[in-house]
Image (spheres, grey):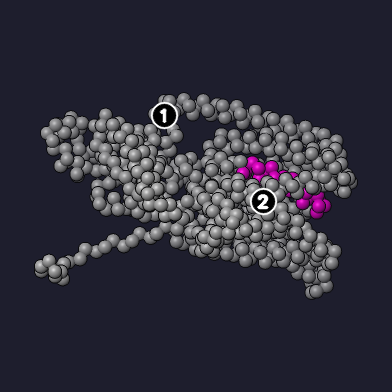
Amino acid sequence: MKMQIKNRSLECGSKKEKDVLIKAGKVNAVEKDRRKILVIGQEDRFSHGLMDYAITLADRLGYDLLALSVGIPGDEQYSQSYQRYQDERFSLGAIESAAVFKQRARQKKIVCEHEIRFGDAGQIVEKIHHQIKRIEFVVTESKAIEETIASYANIPVFCINSNGQNRGGNIMANVETKSKKMLFAQTVGYGLLTVGLYAAVFSNAGVVMKLFTQGGWSAALPIATVFVFSFAHGAFASNLWSLLGISARKTEQPRVAERKVVQPRVSARKRPRVYAHINNYHNI
Amino acid sequence: MHSLVDGSQFIDLSLWSITFLFLVGFVGGLVSGFIGSGGAFVLTPGMMSLGVPGTVAVASNMCHKFPKALVGAYKRYKYGQVDIKLGLVMAASAILGVQVGIKIQNMILSKWGAVGSDLYVSLSFVLVLVVVGGYVFYDAWKTAKSGGEEKVTKIAVWLQSINLPPMIHFKKANITISLWFTIPVGFATGLLAATIAVGGFVGVPGMIYVMGVSSLIASASELVIAFVMGFGGSVNWAAHGMVDIRLTLIILGGSLLGVQLGAIGTTYVKENMIKIVMGTIMLIVAVSRGLCVPKYLSQLGLVSVSEVTTDFLSKVSFICMCIALMTGAVIILVSMWRGTRAAKLAESAAYQAANA
C-alpha cells in the first residue's frame, strides 16, 4: 500500500482568506491550482464515515475534494435500454449521495466536486490523475478499489474502515477499555469451562473410554463431546487471540473472485500527432 | 454394531505424547486454517509412532478433523471467504469419491495385502503431490514474479463459458459453472481423501484451476467439504468404537488454537501465499512418501533392500513430514507478521496524515 504522505504546508491560507476570495469571485482561478483529494465511494454511495474522514482531512490539509462514483458498465447480455436504465439509476443514486457530501463540505467551506464514471476504477483513476494534475491521493472504503488503483495508477491510496464511527481519542479509548475488560472476562470464562471439560474427561478416562468405545449408538457420545469441546474451546481460543491483539484485518469488503475477472490492459495513450492543415480536403 | 477393538489396544498417555500431539495439532490446525487442509498426514503416522493402532489413529484423527474444520469454516465465513453452496456441492460428489476410493483400497488389500495397500497409498501420494503440488508451486512462483495478482486459468474461463445445464451460480465465489464440471473435482477430492486422507490437496487446486475460484474462497470452502466428509467418516468410525476420545481431545486442544490463527492469517496475506504454502508442503510430503516406497517394494519382494536401510528411510520420511508441516507453519507465521506490520504502518500513516 502506498501510504507515504508527507505533511504539507497549507497552501491556501486561512479560512478568512478563503472567504475573501470567495466574495471577490476569484475562487475559481485559485481552485484550479489547489490540491485535491479524490474520494471514491462504495458503488453509488458515500458512507458517513468516508465523508467525515475526507472532509476532516481536506479541512486540515487545505485541499479540495473530488468525489467520484464508479459504476460497473452494463452487462452486454441485457438490452441497451435496460443498460441505460441501470446507468441512470446508478447516476441518480450517486448524485443524491454526492449532494449530501457537497453540503457537508460546504459547511466547512471546502470545495467539493462530483463526477460519475463507468468502467474499471483503476483505469478511471489513472485517467483522472492525468487530466487533473493536482490530485494528491485517493481515499476509498473499498479494499477491492484500493488494490485495483494500486495496480494501475501511481498514486497513494488510503483505504479506510468506515465502520468505526467514533474516531476521536477519549470515546475510542473508553470503548476499547470496556471491550477489553469484557474480552478478558469472556476468555477467562470460556477458559475455565474448557479446563473443566478436559478435567472431567481425563479424570474419568477409564469410564469414558469404556462408554465411548462400545460402538453402535454410543457413537453419538464422542461426536457430541467434540461438538461441546469445539464450542467451549473454540470460543476460548478466539477470545484468547483477540486478547493477545491478534485479530483479523478489518476490510470493508472481502477479497472475492470479482477482482479475478480478466481485466483489459490499459490501452496505450495516443501520442499527439502533428497535422498540417492545407485546406478542408487536405490534411498532411 | 460392536466395538472392533478391546481396551488394551488404547495406549497409555505420557506427558511427552500429550505434548507431541498438542503441538502437532496446533501446527496442523494452523496450516488447515490457512490452506483448508493438511495436518492429517503427520498426525496419523505420528500417533502410530506412539504405538496407537492404525485404525484407531485414523479414526481419532478424523474425529478431531471435522470440529476443527467447522471452527475454521465458521471463522472464515465471518471474514466473508466461505462459499457454503460451493462447499456442499463439492462435498456431495466427494462422498461418492470416498466410496469409490474405499472400494479400490479394499480391492488392493484383498489382492496384495497390507503392504500392497501401503505401496498404493505411497505411490498415489508421490504421483498426485508431485504433479499437482509442482504445478501449484510453479504457478505461485510465476504469480509472485508478476506482481502477486492471481489470474483465472484459461481452462476455467473456457469451462465457465460452456452452457451445459444445470448451470450453478456460486455467489461468494462469483462464478457460474455447469454442475457437470464440479462433479469430477469433488469426486477426485473424495477419492484422494479416501486414499491419502488429505483430499484438499486436490480439492483446493481443482477449485482454483479447473473452476476458476480464487485461492482464498477455495481454501475456505474446502473446510466445508472437510467438515461434511469428516463428520460422515467419524460417525462411521465411532459406530465401530474406534475413536480414542482422549487422543481426539488432545489434538483438538491444539488444533482449535491453530485453525483460528491460520484463518486470521488469511486476512493479512496476498491470495498467492495460500498457493505458495500449499505447493511447498505438497512437494516436501511427496519426497517424504517417496522415501517409503523402497520399504514396501522390498516387503513385496520386488527389490531387495536391507532392513536397516528401510528403517532409516522410514525415520527420514517421518522427519520430512514434520519438516513439511513446520515449513508451512513458518511461512504462514512470517507472512502474517509481515502483513500485520504493514497494516500497522499504514494505519499510523493515515493517522499522521489526518492529524497533520
Does residue B285 show up magenta in the picture? no
Give A77 or B56, whichever is nearer the viewer.
Answer: A77
Q: Which mark is residue B91?
A: 2
Q: Which residues are magenta?
A: B52-73
Q: Which mark is residue A166?
A: 1
Indicate left or right for B133 with B6 as reference: left
Which residue shows up at 65% across the image and 42% down it?
B70
Dot 1 falls on which chain?
A
Give A203 or A119, whichever is nearer the viewer.
Answer: A119
- Whether residue B92 is situated above or below residue A185 in the rendered picture: below
Asked if the residues shown at circle 2 and circle 1 are in contact, with their CB atoms under 8 angstroms apart, the answer is: no
Which residue shows up at 12% across the image and 33% down it?
A24
- Whether residue B86 is situated above or below residue A63 in the rendered picture: below
Amino acid type shown at disc 2? Ala
Magenta stretch, main secondary structure, is helix
Which residue shows up at 75% across the image and 37% down it?
A224
**Quadrant the C terminus of chain B occupies:** top left
Image coords of residue B324 (percent x, y): 64, 57
Dot 2 falls on which chain?
B
Identity of the residue furthest to the left in this view:
A279
Image coords of residue B153 (percent x, y): 52, 62
The secondary structure type at the circle numbered 2 is helix
Amino acid type shown at disc 1? Asn
Specify the quadrant of the image occupied by residue B345.
top left
Specify the quadrant of the image occupied by residue A48.
top left
Q: Is residue B146 visible?
A: yes
The secondary structure type at the circle numbered 1 is loop
Q: How many marks?
A: 2
Q: Is residue A57 visible?
A: no
Does residue B67 show up magenta in the picture? yes
Image coords of residue B197 (percent x, y): 71, 55
